[in-house]
Image: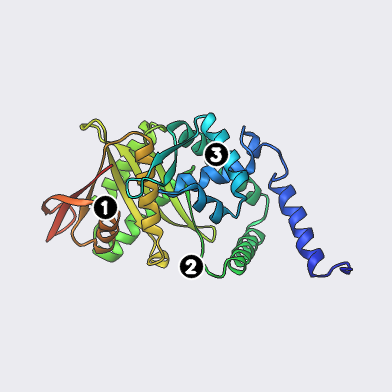
Amino acid sequence: MERPGGPVAAVRGFNRVYTRRLGLLDEQHLGSEFSLGEVRVLYELAHRKGLTAAALARDLELDPGHLSRMLRDLRRRRMVRRARSAEDRRASLLDLTPAGRRAFDRLDRKAESTVSAFLGSFPAPRRGELIRALSTVRRLLEPEAAHPAVLIRNHRVGDLGWILERHGALYVDEYGWGERFEALVAEVLADFAREQDPRREACWVAELDGERVGSILLVRHRERPGVARLRLLLVQPSARGIGVGQALVDTCTAFARSAGYRTITLWTQSVLAAARAIYARAGYVKVAEEPNREFGEGLLAETWELQL
């Protein structure tokens, strides 16, 4: 018999605390019409493309029959759809419908608010200790993960100011771009804050161990119907090389598809080699270039596009 205070008791005690504190015992997750299992399915489909039911069951370690029933119910509620794979006509790929994407985005914002409130109940030193401890637990449970988990979330109050400050500081340090570049970033963010259409425009922030390490925006093109603009991709130096930029771009692409855009376009500079490599891997193609003297001498501005 397990003695009080032993290893098994410690794990079971932790399980009781975190399921209660985070509301995981509720039949409907975060007060929504979805169970926790259904929310996990929506999360995976929102962040990954080309998933089959078999792959989803394997990755979530779910009984295939149980997952099949969940998917059937989500399809009945028009949250999830199936389509034949272009590469293998025998396989069916799963994706969120526009209604499913909107439902997930609402849940994602509610989860961000709930967890933020939970973390805010701790004083700063204990909050940092908690985040580090949770990161350690995850790395121990998933030793096969090569890097710490990156969280991509919708922006919240305070993030736009952080994006402006980080762009200004990083680009002046790395490329010598000064106030004219910072003014351009400020204009983009101000326009987004004033005019955002949540159905077709979004801003995401990447977090690593609870710290902001990256950002990206998707906005509609004001002059080209059906075209979206990818803007302000940023990755902190401390988080480069572990897939943060690719995760942000992939999130942006998935949202653009669900919002009904036909094309994503972006404007970048030839000196931004790391960003250009990310765009190329994501399928973007350079369609135009021209000299740009707005931020300094010797720059070549490039336009890249992705057909959805």
Mark with earlier residue (1, 3): 3
Q: In the rendered view, would you say 207 is above or below 46?
A: below
Determine whether, in the image, residue 167 is placed left or right of residue 12: left
Mark with earlier residue (2, 1): 2
Front one among 236 and 285: 285
Q: Secondary structure at mark 3?
A: helix
* Residue ID at (38%, 67%): 241
* Residue ID at (47%, 45%): 45
Q: Secondary structure at mark 2?
A: loop
Q: Horizontal and vertical percent for residue 114? A: 62, 43
* Residue ID at (61%, 47%): 115
Name the residue type under label 2: His
Category of crowding for the residue at label 1, using alpha-carbon neighbours closer than 10 angstroms: few (below 14), some (14–19), many (at least 20): few
On the image, numbered disc 2 is attached to which residue?
147
Q: Horizontal and vertical percent for residue 70? A: 59, 39
Category of crowding for the residue at label 2, using alpha-carbon neighbours closer than 10 angstroms: few (below 14), some (14–19), many (at least 20): few
Q: Secondary structure at mark 1?
A: loop
Quarter that holds the N terminus: bottom right
Measured in 3D between alpha carbons, the distance from the residue under mark 1 to the one under mark 3, in whole angstroms, is 30 Å
Measured in 3D between alpha carbons, the distance from the residue under mark 2 to the one under mark 3, in whole angstroms, is 31 Å
> Residue 283: which numbered mark, if any?
1
On the image, numbered disc 3 is attached to which residue?
71
